[in-house]
Amino acid sequence: MWRSRRKLMVLPLALAAFFMAACGGGGGEGGGSGDGGEVVNIGYSGPLSGGASLYGENVLSGIEMAVEDLNEEGVEIDGQPVTFEIASLDDRYLPNEAATNAQRLVQQDDAPVVFIPHSGGIFAAQSINTDRNEFLLGAYSSDPAILEQENPLTMMIPPRFDNYMEPFVGTTMDEFGDSLGLIPTESEYGQEWTDQVTEEWEAQGGEVLSNNGVDYTTTTDYAGPVTQALSEDPDVLFIGGPSQPTALVIEAARNQGFEGGFIVMDQAKVEEMEEFTSEENINGSVGVMPLIESDEAGTEDFVTRYEEEISEDRLPVSEVGYNYQAMHVVAKAMELAGSTDDPQAIRENIEPALAEVEDEYKVINFPEGFTEEGHLAGPVVATFVEDGEYTELEVPQEQ
């Protein structure tokens, strides 16, 4: 598989302008007319400021790119031409703001679908999306607890993170040793990851040291928690949150002489962390396989288009690709349902919609099915970074 191992750079002004425009919301109201057709607003609530803003912008860019495809291609639903627009709001990674935003997007923008990319916000939205203001929740978080809510209007997009536990633990324990230090993000997602990686590490015979978790969305200096964790002489560090702060944790650990391995939560992307620390520092990490390594039919053209339309200096990471695909699935489900405003009918048609998505729009681990619990389930691929190269890890899949 071809690859591009370039250094990443800071968001250019053009990309910042792109997302500022996106944050302005849709230009028409759902159910309104544009060129004689219907305008459908797709809602988005995510972090567009603060320490997780890059992550939130990545998710949004994937949805935006899919909407551009759909509008250029032309979509008809129930015999009516449809134009999709994005209505997006910043929730600063706060669950209560995500739920408030979702309600606003449904009530004011008539959004039948709202994408939210963090578990706290998803859980909050699951408490309201089946009431008077129904909406399909595009849940971009890998927390398997999302599926345990038995919410009939949830579509969980990425692979479940419990898939990664066995290979991540086994690989790093074999390579570096059996003591694990913890410096996770303190979000709900981070706490769930910490509980499961702790259980798996101990199940494989290792020792788990103290938890030195911090808020990755607000902390700027990680030297203190890193020092505390390294004082116990761990062989491996469990870390993760958004890519930028995760890279800063790695750099702080390397600067303090740590030579062991890293288990990196799936929210952080190893190729994106190279923007904020050196490739050498990331060696010894297990994490999510980069999108550029995917062998899906549409990957290469997607990467080229991303570089042309979004940034010449950045590579699209997996959250861009997964949300891009998910939006195409939603549009096909609307076509099959013959409805843009019935969330239940749209969800009922997600499974058959998977077979209708064109190959050119499949860019990373395209889902093979839609589970009863509401998960877009598909292949799972992870990596061990060694000498600047990505070695594929076999990942057993939980449904």
Image: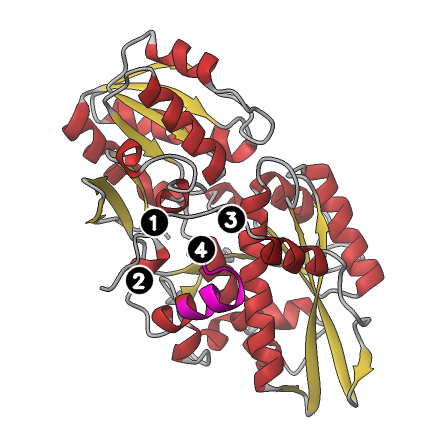
Instruction: Check residue 132 for magenta coloring.
Output: no
Which element carries disc 4, helix, strand or loop?
loop
Q: Residue furthest left?
A: 174
Task: Choose mark 2 or mark 1, whichever is in front.
Answer: 2
Sequence-first disc among 1 and 4: 4
Which element carries disc 3, helix, strand or loop?
helix
- Split into 4 quadrants, where in the image is the N terminus? bottom left
Question: What residue is disc 1 on?
Answer: 398
Q: Is residue 33 above or below residue 195?
A: below
Residue 82 picture location, percent across and down: 69, 82
Q: Is residue 201 above or below residue 99?
A: above
Task: Choose mark 1 or mark 4, whichever is in front.
Answer: 4
Residue 58 picture location, percent across and down: 53, 53
Residue 294's disc is 2
Task: Choose mark 2 or mark 3, whichever is in front.
Answer: 2
Sequence-first disc among 2 and 3: 3
Q: Marks 2 and 1, how far apart in space?
A: 21 Å
Question: What residue is disc 4 on?
Answer: 313
Q: Amino acid at mark 3?
A: Leu
- Magenta-colored span: 304-316
Q: Is residue 193 visible?
A: no
Sequence-first disc among 2 and 1: 2
Residue 147's disc is 3
Q: Marks 1 and 3, how far apart in space?
A: 12 Å
Q: Quadrant of residue 226?
A: top left
Q: Marks 4 and 3, how far apart in space?
A: 36 Å
Q: Amino acid at mark 2?
A: Ser
- Mark 3 surroundings within 10 Å by alpha-carbon count, few (fewer than 14), some (14 through 19), many (20 or more): many
